Image: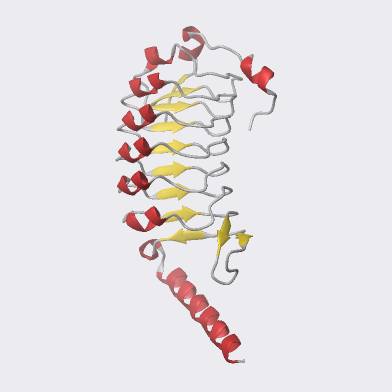
């Protein structure tokens, strides 16, 4: 995350429309991308609504603390990258980005998410690692197209219930959360590695290895109980 005190963040750089246009790029698959990463901005440039036809916006590694409501002008947006900023909350208007496929909010200061997140029906990847989240809104269950969700380095004490309701989910990253297990009763243990994957996406060898490891672990637990 960009370093600096509040005063420094408040004095972040400004981006003119001309400068923003110079940051437009064409991706290899023909998408129009606005790359404003690492520009030292503390607020989203007011000129952005004039570039709302872009399909990808990268505002990562800046000093941004707030997302303005004009974000919903970007009706064609497919990718929004805001990782490594100072965001503490998201506006409900983010739920109007109906065509969004990828949303990266890693390395911010989020402690909660708006219920409007459940309106992002086409979302495939949601990255929320390195925040301050301890739960997810129940509306997240509505993201039935979601394939990947990153929740590492947060404050989850249990696997969010909504995870089990998303049928197409293939990978969940819960690394380094204070997950409470039955063995530790009510004591929190930071998990170094906890990833959930859908069995159908594993090759036969990997699936067999997982099943073998699980059986070995269960045998060890049974042996411990009888000795």
- Of 77 and 221, nearer the camera is 221
- Of 188 and 48, nearer the camera is 188
Tally the numbered discs.
0
Residue 7's place in the image compared with 92, above or below, is above
Residue at image coords 57%, 83%? 220
Would you say 192 lies left or right of 57 here?
A: right
Please provide percent x and percent y for residue 150.
Answer: 49, 48
Residue at image coords 41%, 36%? 114
Give the quarter of the figure containing the N terminus: top right
Would you say 20 lies left or right of 163 here?
A: right
Would you identify the image quadrant in which residue 98 lies? Answer: top left
Please provide percent x and percent y for residue 84.
Answer: 58, 33
Please provide percent x and percent y for residue 27.
Answer: 42, 29
Residue 53's place in the image compared with 154, above or below, is above
Would you identify the image quadrant in which residue 178 lies? Answer: bottom right
Residue at image coords 58%, 91%? 226
Please provide percent x and percent y for residue 128.
Answer: 50, 42
Give the quarter of the figure containing the C terminus: bottom right
Residue at image coords 53%, 52%? 156
Would you say 9 lies left or right of 58 here?
A: right
Q: How does the figure colour the protein chain or chains?
A: secondary structure
Outermost residue to the front: 186
Residue 40's place in the image compared with 197, above or below, is above
Outermost residue to the bottom: 227
């Amino acid at each position: 995350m960009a370093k600096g005190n509040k005063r420094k963040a408040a004095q972040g750089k400004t981006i003119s429309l001309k400068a923003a246009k110079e940051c437009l790029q064409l991706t290899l698959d023909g998408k129009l991308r606005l790359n404003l990463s690492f520009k030292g901005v503390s607020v989203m440039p007011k000129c952005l609504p004039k570039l709302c036809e872009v399909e990808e916006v990268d505002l990562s590694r800046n000093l941004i603390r707030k997302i303005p409501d004009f974000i919903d002008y970007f009706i064609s947006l497919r990718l929004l990258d805001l990782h490594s900023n100072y965001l503490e909350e998201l506006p409900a208007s983010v739920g109007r980005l109906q065509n969004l496929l990828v949303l990266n909010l890693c390395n911010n200061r989020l402690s909660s998410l708006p219920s409007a997140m459940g309106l992002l029906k086409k979302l495939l990847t949601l990255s929320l690692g390195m925040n301050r989240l301890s739960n997810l809104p129940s509306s997240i269950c509505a993201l039935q197209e979601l394939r990947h969700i990153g929740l590492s380095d947060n404050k989850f004490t249990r696997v969010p219930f909504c995870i089990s309701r998303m049928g197409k989910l293939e990978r969940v990253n819960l690394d380094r959360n204070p997950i409470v297990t039955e063995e530790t009763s009510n004591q929190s243990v930071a998990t170094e590695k906890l990833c959930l994957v859908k069995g159908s996406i594993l090759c036969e060898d990997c699936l067999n290895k997982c099943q073998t490891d699980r059986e070995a672990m269960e045998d060890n637990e049974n042996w411990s109980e009888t000795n």
